[in-house]
Image: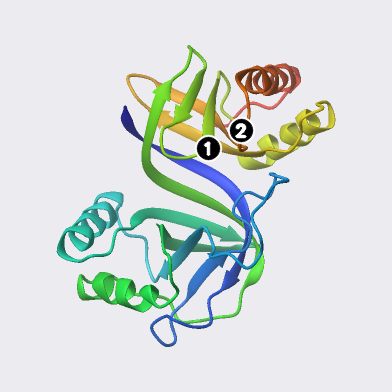
Amino acid sequence: METFGSLVKEEQLKTVESGIIPNTLVLENLESFPGYYGAAPTDRMPDAFFLITTQKESTEKILRLTHIIKNNTNINIEGSPGRICINNDTYHSIRLRDISDYSMLSEIQNHYRDAGIKFMKKKHIDAPGIIQIKKIFPIEKIDDKIYKDIERDMFYLRIDKQCNWSHFKSVTTKVRNNMHSSGFDAALAVIYTRDVMDMIRIYSKDIDIETLKEIHNKYIEYLSKSLYEIKQ
């Protein structure tokens, strides 16, 4: 099934210096899955680029414009609205995936700009950022608590507790320190079906179901011990 939701993760971000519209701010992620030990070589293309806009655009607008660009050109991209927090600054963005060449960026920017999207002026950034993305999740159900992304090596573990990033990051450290298999990347997700499902996104190549269940049980254990409750 395909369903809508949001994802929160932390990545190292850096300003793109070439292949973009002059004096605009585009960021790239230097390591897309920082918790995964089998990461790809550093000379590969970034997993994602972030076009930084001057203002927040609606989710519907970004998704519609991306759909139009894909239909009217030969560019097959995934474009999702997002928000990035770096230190005390917040940036609104369009997250792009499936970019095979830096030279495509300026063309993609021009398509969005022609549709009325305005981009922030270029500035130097090289820092970790907390990224929130709104996106479509193509998933299949493995059991009542575990779902798999049908396009990528990602799994979603359902939890019964809502938490913010700092709390989740603290719990993740405890989980890693108490497992033999700690070579996975973790993020927070919320997926909307009939219910609002709080999830932990796990990325690791060739991970087996038993290891996923072990990870899941560890998160449930440490979340249940936590005194933190989300403030509404």
Rendered image: mark on residue 7: none
The CA distance from mark 2 to mark 1 is 8 Å
- Is 178 on the left or on the right of 52, as rendered? right
Residue placed most toward the observer, 232 or 68: 68
Residue placed most toward the observer, 156 or 170: 156
Q: Furthest-left residue in view? A: 72
Per the image, the residue denoted by label 2 is 206
Residue 168 point in image, percent of width and height: 67, 35
Residue 63 point in image, percent of width and height: 27, 52
Residue plotted at (54% across, 44% down): 8
Q: Tag 1's secondary structure?
A: loop
Residue type indicated by callout 1: Asp
Rendered image: mark on residue 153: 1
Residue plotted at (36% across, 73% down): 104
Number of numbered labels in the structure image: 2
Quarter placement of the N terminus: top left
Residue plotted at (17% across, 58% down): 71
Task: Determine contact: label 2, label 1, CB under 8 Å.
Answer: yes
Give above or below for 67 relative to 185. below
